[in-house]
Amino acid sequence: MNFLYQLVYTSQRNPACTDTEIQNILESCKRNNPSKDITGVLLHSDDHFIQYLEGDKDIIKLYDLIKEDSRHRNAVLLSYGPLKERAFPSWHMGYKNLPKDQVDFLTESNEADRKLFNSIIKGEKQSGTSATNLLVKFFNRA
Ligand SMILES: Cc1cc2nc3c(=O)[nH]c(=O)nc-3n(C[C@H](O)[C@H](O)[C@H](O)COP(=O)(O)O)c2cc1C
């Protein structure tokens, strides 16, 4: 039996990574993730990414490949560990742009979420569970 793992990292989007490049990244996800049974979400703002991956323990190998991608830099692994059940079972890579107003919305609504979000985006270590919960919240707010 393959155990489930989750992985969260944050990185800085390179200025050369245009919105078209984001579409190319999502095409790669569509092409490669289903056969590896990898699901998750990719949040991007003008200058950052936060990606959450779920799959077997080899998602760390995908992370090793992704972190060398020239469309971003300074990838910081926030969490990698066992997972009981998938948070995004049907999404081979959900994605969302993070416009400033949405972050502001979070700011107004919940001080604790805002603090957590800011520390995630700065690449500070967070527990996997709290980072995952915040991502789930983001996606359920759509
Ligand atoms: C922020 C970010 C997230 C990425 N996420 C994935 C992913 O989940 N799966 C994937 O196959 N490639 C992902 N990539 C792209 C890989 O770095 C790599 O370009 C791609 O896997 C190469 O496969 P391809 O030749 O089929 O496009 C990501 C790249 C970036 C910059």
Image (spheres, rainbow, N blue to C red):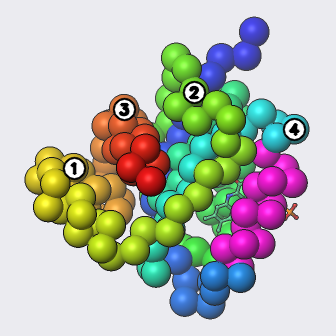
Q: Earlier in the sequence, mark 2 or mark 4?
A: 4
Q: Ligand 1 near label 3 (Cβ, under 8 Å)?
A: no
Q: CA distance from mark 3 to mark 2?
A: 12 Å
Q: Which mark is residue 86?
A: 2
Amino acid under disc 1: Asp
From the image, tell me which residue sits under label 4: 35
Q: Which residue is mark 3?
A: 129
Q: Label 2 sits on what residue type?
A: Arg
* Residue at 53% from the left image edge and 46% from the top image edge: 52
Between circles 3 and 2, the one closer to the viewer is: 2
Mark in the foreground, 1 or 3? 1
Identify which residue is drawn at 73% across, 16% down. 2
Specify whether 22 is left or right of 74: right
* Magenta segment: 21-33
- Nearer-N-terminus badge (3/4): 4
Which quarter of the frame holds ligand 1?
bottom right
The x, y position of residue 58, in whole percent, is 71, 35
Q: Residue at x 82, y 41 (%)?
A: 34
Does 85 lie within the magenta span?
A: no
- Label 1 with label 4: CB-CB less than 8 Å: no
Q: Amino acid at mark 4?
A: Ser
